[in-house]
Image (cartoon, rainbow, N blue to C red):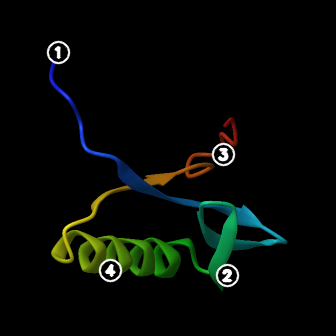
Amino acid sequence: MKMLPDRTVLTVLRHNQLWAIECAGDHFGHARDKEEVKATANKRARQMQDGGQACLVRVIGENGYFGG
């Protein structure tokens, strides 16, 4: 079986009427514009990957579906 490295998951979602990034229970990067928040999440993920940390960005609610 192939072992996958632990990876950090950055989730873009709705939080307090805004879009935000959630990581390990913390919410940050709040903005009204979803695309702005997605760009911030991808930038953060790139920084983490450049530092050697595997990372994943996912979006919840992008097409009106807010399931977990």
Residue shown at 69%/35% (left/top)?
67
Instruction: Measure the alpha-carbon separation of dots 4 and 2.
Output: 18 Å
Q: Position of residue 54 (x, y in %)?
A: 26, 57
Q: Residue 32 carries which label?
A: 2
Earlier in the chain: of badge 3 and badge 2, it is: 2
Instruction: Measure the alpha-carbon separation of dots 3 and 2.
Output: 16 Å
Q: Where is residue 56 in the image (x, y as percent from the top left)?
A: 35, 54
Amino acid identity at mark 1: Met
Q: What element carries label 1?
A: loop
Is residue 22 depicted above or below 63 in this figure?
A: below
> In which image quadrant can residue 42 be found?
bottom left
Q: Do the residues labelled 4 and 2 touch (CB within 8 Å)?
A: no
Q: Residue 61 carries which label?
A: none
Residue shown at 51%/77% (left/top)?
37
Is residue 58 depicted above or below 47 in this figure?
A: above
Q: Residue 43 carries which label?
A: 4
Instruction: Measure the alpha-carbon separation of dots 4 and 3.
Output: 24 Å
Residue shown at 63%/49% (left/top)?
61
> In which image quadrant can residue 53 be found?
bottom left
Instruction: Measure the alpha-carbon separation of dots 1 and 4.
Output: 31 Å
> In which image quadrant can residue 41 be found?
bottom left
Task: From the viewer's side, name the closer residue of 56 and 36.
Answer: 56
Q: Name the residue under label 3.
A: 64
Q: Is mark 3 on a helix, strand or loop?
A: loop
Q: Mark 1 points at which residue?
A: 1
Instruction: Measure the alpha-carbon separation of dots 2 and 1.
Output: 43 Å
Q: Position of residue 57 (x, y in %)?
A: 40, 57
Is residue 60 depicted above or below 31 in this figure?
A: above
Q: Where is residue 8 in the image (x, y as percent from the top left)?
A: 41, 57
Nearest to viewer (mark 2 / mark 1): 1
* Left or right: 5 in relation to 12: left
Residue shown at 45%/71% (left/top)?
38
